[in-house]
């Protein structure tokens, strides 16, 4: 603990080196272990993403970080404060946007904002300097009931409500779920601006393609972290040669590639099929040649194979298979 | 303080914007007063009466005169024998008959009780007993006068209406109605509005704020205190304007006791909301756990004295029971705090216990 | 009978002065996987309701599975299946109860239901969970089950509404492989979604903007036409012309 007495909420810099420290955190609900021995550090000023499907344990982890749940084992510290012992101090300094936006549909956008400002003992005017870039897009709809706003607008309003008290750290649990592609992109642009202002942002998402917008990501599956790194490093660390395979008969191609003796993983991937060869260190050209020959012998003669760099989704699947022995 | 005002404002918006619910909350008490007052009223008018008087004399003529003067009775005829009664009752021409003895004048000065027969159509037992009571009251009065004049003895039709000589049932149902309305507005609506925040997830946002859950609950509850109080005034006003119901005791005391009961009901609502996770659960719990006991076990509809012993014991924990005694005491008997302090203390203790239970269950986290 | 599973010509729907769907013309071939894309409010839902006979077009016409959507709405509905991730199965019924209920709605005999249940559960490997409550089975399986149940009455066309939201990448791919297998048997699959990476899995797709179809073709063709690297980018240019 770097600070004891008199630690008022207004001084974000004078805290521990890590904005978040999770140590061997485990949380069970009855028979189900929602989070299983997770450890991770998040640095000050980082835009950190937890990426994983529904049921991976993201929401449980987020609720614990914002002091709403108590760990069954391990510890969770935010801004150097324990989420169990220093509950009240943390609550004044944390910004949180829960999974379902959580607005009052019968209040107008402005009334929602005013209410959440008052809950944190501040006012919209006092918080305006922080939320201004977001509120500017919302201002034309200030008088509209929150229930009548579009998904993207609701999401931005919820972000304003979570930010209006100038928190030192922001937790966003699946902020882009149920929002259209363009609004998602705009939302991430907003997060970029907030991070540029020095705010630590912790975000969760089930969408793999959003990982590249984070400084670092943790891939999460069934309550465990598969790995934690920068999006670039996660792709670079893909341990085997990876190819994009294109052919007219997608379903047939999947079958043929899976029968290839050296196939390690074969998955449809949008328009193409991603093929991972089990042999590390082999030249791409010779693998391509082998594949084309094999496919031709199986009746698929329009195979186009191209060596590619792995993305987050490829890495996620690779580690999932390793974890589960799929 | 800023957050408290923010809360009250927001809660007021919720109430005012849900127009349907708002008007129901406001008008329901009025509609109920009118319903109970006109449709469900236990007063009986236009009782078709036959009098059998085998030997007309001054005394029996005086009786006929009194029944004729009462607005509750319509005298269908005075007969010399009981012969027309059988058919009259069967066909519904008569609902009540009084059979006087053939030696009435002599009996009034004699020593033995005067044998007056009172026959009532009790197909509807409630109405029957009320008709009987009205008739007995008139007989009683008439007998008193006759005896003074004749210096004779007793008449054995005993029925005395204390405190409620006009027998207006509005005095009986208004206190119960106040309890019922407050239970609905205060207990049911607060528990629903708190669980709604749980359901929509906004409770999660509120819990993460530096506000203590108590502040959240108080902020949410205050507007319902106001609404409940407005309802009390509405019911009282309607009872007075439309039915001319008297208020014999102190209005200040009555309002203070109502405020206490509003707090009781709110505490009940809070206790429910700490347990229920959905609005539907809260609603069912409020209906089954509060509304029905208020209706059935408080003495509102069924007199507590006529309940089986186990229910009588259970009725002790129904706060409405004590509130009912208090309100009836103030309004009908003009009682003051010196007579009602025991009931007030019981109600206050119940409120305190409920608040403590609610407070202990109020979670500062999601689990 | 036409070889086209869906044939819409100038399909239009107006609500007062507001034109929700503005003369859209498109067709989907038998056995095709077609993506029907658009932002919320672009007219996707209205178009879809007209195609399944729930809403009458203001003008234009459409046939689905060879039946006119206005004159033969009943026949259209008998020949289509529908699955949405959120509403398809009853959580508080068992797997078997859900299947029986659905089979009953479509008038299958008990023998047919029993036989198809066996095949269906065998195909997705859920035989052991026949008596489990649906809420107890994992999301990935639930999706595959919902899809299979929507196919129980062997519809010619199946409508999928955002079918793979929220699942892990492997489960998602298994689901798409199921879709491909279904399409290979001649069933047409129409996927409505606003997740563009999901659209990349379709054979062809259309993007609706403000009630009209703004782009149509294979994912490669659409990206090519806009010189964009991803459908995301295409979508951004179509919906926020000033932004990119």
Image (spheres, coloured by chain):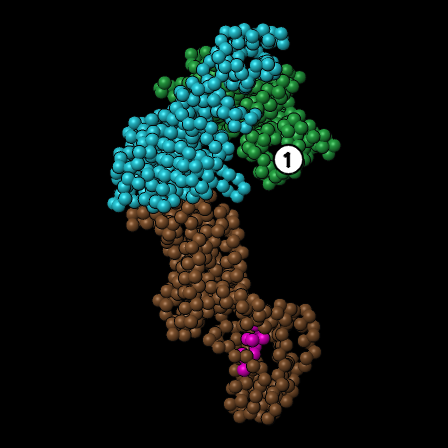
Instruction: Please name the residue shown 63% across and 9% down the image.
Output: A298
Please give the range of residues in magenta.
Answer: B130-140
**Is residue A244 within the magenta segment?**
no
Q: Is residue A105 left or right of residue A295?
A: left
Instruction: Please name the residue shown 41% across and 68% down the image.
Output: B345
Quadrant for the C terminus of chain A in the image: top right
Residue furthest right as drawn: C111
Instruction: Please name the residue shown 33% across and 33% down the image.
Output: A18
User: Which chain's residue wears label 1?
Assistant: C
**Is residue B137 within the magenta segment?**
yes
Quadrant for the N terminus of chain A in the image: top left
The answer to which quarter of the image holds residue A301 is: top right
Q: Is residue B160 left or right of residue B213?
A: right
Q: Which residue is mark 1?
A: C129
User: Percent from the top left, x then y, of residue B290?
Assistant: 50, 58
User: Percent from the top left, x then y, of residue B367?
Assistant: 45, 46
Q: Which chain is brown?
A: B
The answer to which quarter of the image holds residue C48 is: top right
Q: Which chain is green?
A: C
Colour for chain A in the figure: cyan
């Amino acid at each position: 603990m770097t600070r004891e007495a008199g630690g008022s909420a207004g001084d974000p810099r004078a805290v521990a080196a890590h904005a978040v420290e999770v140590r061997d955190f485990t949380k069970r609900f009855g028979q189900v272990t929602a989070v299983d021995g997770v450890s991770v550090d998040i640095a000050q000023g980082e835009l950190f993403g937890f990426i994983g499907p529904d049921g991976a344990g993201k929401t449980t982890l987020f609720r614990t970080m914002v002091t709403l749940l108590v760990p069954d084992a391990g510890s969770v510290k935010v801004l150097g404060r324990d989420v169990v012992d220093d509950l009240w101090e943390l609550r004044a300094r944390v910004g949180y946007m829960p999974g379902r936006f959580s607005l009052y549909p019968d209040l107008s956008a402005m009334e929602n904002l005013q209410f959440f400002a008052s809950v944190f003992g501040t006012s919209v005017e006092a918080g305006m300097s922080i939320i201004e870039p977001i509120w500017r897009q919302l201002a034309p709809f200030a008088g509209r009931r929150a229930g009548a706003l579009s998904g993207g607008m609701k999401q931005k309003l919820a972000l304003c409500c979570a930010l209006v008290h100038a928190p030192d750290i922001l937790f966003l649990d699946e902020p882009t779920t149920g929002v259209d592609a363009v609004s998602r992109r705009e939302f991430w642009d907003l997060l970029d601006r907030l991070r540029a202002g020095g705010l630590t942002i912790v975000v969760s998402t089930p969408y793999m393609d959003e990982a590249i917008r984070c400084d670092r990501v943790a891939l999460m599956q069934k309550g465990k972290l598969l790995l934690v790194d920068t999006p670039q490093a996660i792709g670079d660390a893909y341990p085997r040669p990876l190819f994009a395979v294109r052919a007219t008969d997608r379903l047939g191609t999947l079958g043929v590639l899976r029968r290839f003796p050296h196939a390690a993983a074969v998955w449809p991937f949008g328009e193409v099929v991603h093929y991972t060869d089990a042999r590390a260190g082999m030249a791409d050209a010779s693998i391509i040649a082998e594949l084309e020959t094999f496919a031709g012998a199986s009746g698929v003669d329009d195979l186009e194979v191209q060596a590619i760099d792995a993305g987050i989704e490829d890495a996620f699947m690779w580690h999932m298979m390793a974890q589960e022995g799929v | 303080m800023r957050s408290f005002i923010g809360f009250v404002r927001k809660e007021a918006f919720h109430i005012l914007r849900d127009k349907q619910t708002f008007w129901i909350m406001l008008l329901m008490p009025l509609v109920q007063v009118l319903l109970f007052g006109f449709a469900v009223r236990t007063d009986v008018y236009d009782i078709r009466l036959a009098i059998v008087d085998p030997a007309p004399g001054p005394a029996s003529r005086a009786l006929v005169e009194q029944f004729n003067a009462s607005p509750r009775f319509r005298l269908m005829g005075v007969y010399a024998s009981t012969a027309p009664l059988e058919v009259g009752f069967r066909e519904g021409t008569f609902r009540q008959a009084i059979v006087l003895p053939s030696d009435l004048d002599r009996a009034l000065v004699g020593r033995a009780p005067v044998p007056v027969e009172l026959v009532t159509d009790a197909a509807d037992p409630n109405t029957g007993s009320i008709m009987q009571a009205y008739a007995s009251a008139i007989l009683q009065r008439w007998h008193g006068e006759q005896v003074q004049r004749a210096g004779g003895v007793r008449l054995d039709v005993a029925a005395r209406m204390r405190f409620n000589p006009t027998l207006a049932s509005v005095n009986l149902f208004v206190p119960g109605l106040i309890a019922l309305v407050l239970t609905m507005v205060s207990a049911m609506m607060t528990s629903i509005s708190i669980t709604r925040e749980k359901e929509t997830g906004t409770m999660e946002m509120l819990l993460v704020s530096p506000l203590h859950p108590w502040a959240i609950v108080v902020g949410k509850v205050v507007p319902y205190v106001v609404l409940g109080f407005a309802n009390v005034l509405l019911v009282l006003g309607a009872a007075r304007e439309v039915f001319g119901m008297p208020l014999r005791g102190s209005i200040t005391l009555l309002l203070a006791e109502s405020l206490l009961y509003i707090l009781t009901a709110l505490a009940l609502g809070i206790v429910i909301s700490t347990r229920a996770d959905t609005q539907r659960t809260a609603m069912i719990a409020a209906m089954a756990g509060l509304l029905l006991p208020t209706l059935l076990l408080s003495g509102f509809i069924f007199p507590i004295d006529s309940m089986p012993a186990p229910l009588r014991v259970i009725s002790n924990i129904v706060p409405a029971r004590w509130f009912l005694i208090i309100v009836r005491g103030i309004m009908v008997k003009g009682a003051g705090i010196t007579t009602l302090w025991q009931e007030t203390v019981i109600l206050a203790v119940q409120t305190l216990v409920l608040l403590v239970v609610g407070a202990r269950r109020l979670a500062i986290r999601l689990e | 009978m036409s070889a086209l599973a869906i044939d819409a010509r100038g399909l239009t729907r107006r609500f007062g002065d507001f034109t929700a769907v503005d003369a859209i013309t498109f067709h989907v071939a038998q056995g095709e996987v077609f993506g029907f894309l658009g932002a919320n409010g672009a007219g996707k839902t209205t178009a879809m309701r007209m195609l399944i006979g729930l809403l009458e077009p203001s003008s234009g016409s459409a046939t689905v599975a060879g039946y006119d959507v206005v004159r033969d709405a009943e026949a259209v509905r008998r020949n289509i299946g529908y699955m949405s991730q959120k509403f398809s199965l009853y959580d508080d019924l068992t797997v078997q109860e859900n299947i029986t209920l659905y089979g009953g709605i479509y008038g299958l005999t008990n023998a047919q239901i029993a036989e198809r249940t066996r095949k269906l559960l065998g195909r997705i490997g859920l035989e052991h969970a026949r008596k489990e409550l649906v809420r107890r089975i994992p999301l990935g399986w639930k999706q595959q089950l919902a899809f299979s149940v929507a196919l129980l009455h062997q519809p010619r066309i199946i409508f999928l509404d955002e079918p793979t939201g929220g699942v892990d990448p492997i489960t998602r791919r298994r689901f798409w492989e199921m879709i491909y297998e279904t399409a290979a048997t001649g069933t047409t699959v129409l996927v409505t979604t606003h997740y563009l990476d999901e659209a990349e899995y379709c054979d062809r797709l259309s993007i609706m903007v403000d009630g009209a179809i703004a782009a149509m073709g294979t994912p490669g063709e659409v990206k090519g036409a806009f010189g964009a690297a991803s459908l995301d980018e295409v979508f951004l240019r179509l919906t926020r012309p000033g932004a990119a």
